[in-house]
Image (spheres, rainbow, N blue to C red):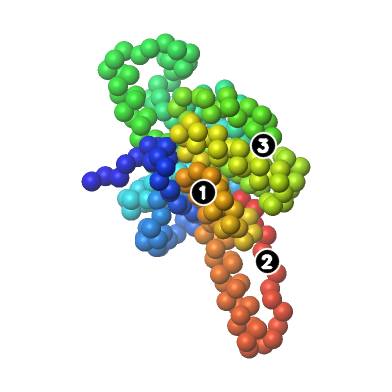
Amino acid sequence: MKPEPLASRLRQPSRLYGTLIVSPSPHWVPVVAGLGLDFVFIDTEHIPISREKLAWMCRAYRAEGQPPSVRITSPDPYEACVALDGGAVGIVAPYVETPAQVAALVGAVKKRPLKGQLLAQHLAGQTLPPALDDYVAQGGATRSLIINIESAPALAALDDILAVEGLDGVLIGPHDLSCSLGVPENYDHPRFLAACDQIITKARARSLGAGVHAIYPGHRLDHEERWARLGANFIVHAADIILFAEGLRRDLDELRRRLDLTPASPTPKIII
């Protein structure tokens, strides 16, 4: 039996776990597939991945039963279409701040293959012929749309953003959100924590998926637990490159401590 589409799973209370994948190595795919994840998050906003390589990664992970959600470089409907054509089952749009941006993305992700005037008229409220309406709805149910909430203007417009029909979930971008709130990288600041709580609570009240990309140093499992208990139902934990760096540094530091008594290595700074 094929698994339920990610779009509908995002709206359920059961929790989903994923991680950000940077490595395009074909050897990485079966390893990741064996980790028990519910999805993989492929980032093209901060990671240089060509269209051809992205399509290969999406198709490979789909073949292993790992739904790939792709963060595009900007909240651009055309970029969303490119990623979907390459094999993505979900789109994550960065730095969304207005309901109009969400509506345009809904047109690209949920209303395919409508384009041009027909799409514009439909988004404005014009009904489609029954056969076409069914066709569009069936296709849209298989694709998920998640937006990054990561700025003070997005917080101010949050109620209107969440009200746009066709949105499946929101993903908090901690680094950009902390900067926009004036507390850069201070992930324990009450202003940052309150904003995250607000986003998650309001999204789940509308039965939308809500999650956090916990990628900052140490990943703060207590923060992830805090938000999960508030109702966050999908977690994007860290990234392969960060987990590799931290694991290797930890082991080498321990070996140096035992063998050479040399100081610990500095913590690499990676912002995604």
Percent across and percent down for residue 25 are 45, 59
* Residue at far bottom of view: 259
* Residue at far top of view: 126
Earlier sequence position, callout 3 versus callout 1: 3
| Residue at figure coordinates x 71%, y 46% from the top left | 190
Please give the residue where the numbered disc 1 appears in the rendered image.
228
* Residue at far left of view: 1
Question: Dot 2: few (<14), some (14–19), or many (≥20) neighbours within 10 Å?
Answer: few
Q: Does residue 226 appear to the left or right of 265 in the view shown?
A: left
Percent across and percent down for residue 145 are 46, 34
Question: Dot 3: few (<14), some (14–19), or many (≥20) neighbours within 10 Å?
Answer: many
Along the viewing direction, whichever of 250 and 155 lies nearer the viewer = 155
Please give the residue where the numbered disc 3 appears in the rendered image.
151
Residue 115 appears in the picture as rendered? yes
Q: CA distance from mark 3 to mark 2?
A: 27 Å
| Residue at figure coordinates x 38%, y 12% from the top left | 127
Q: CA distance from mark 3 to mark 1?
A: 21 Å
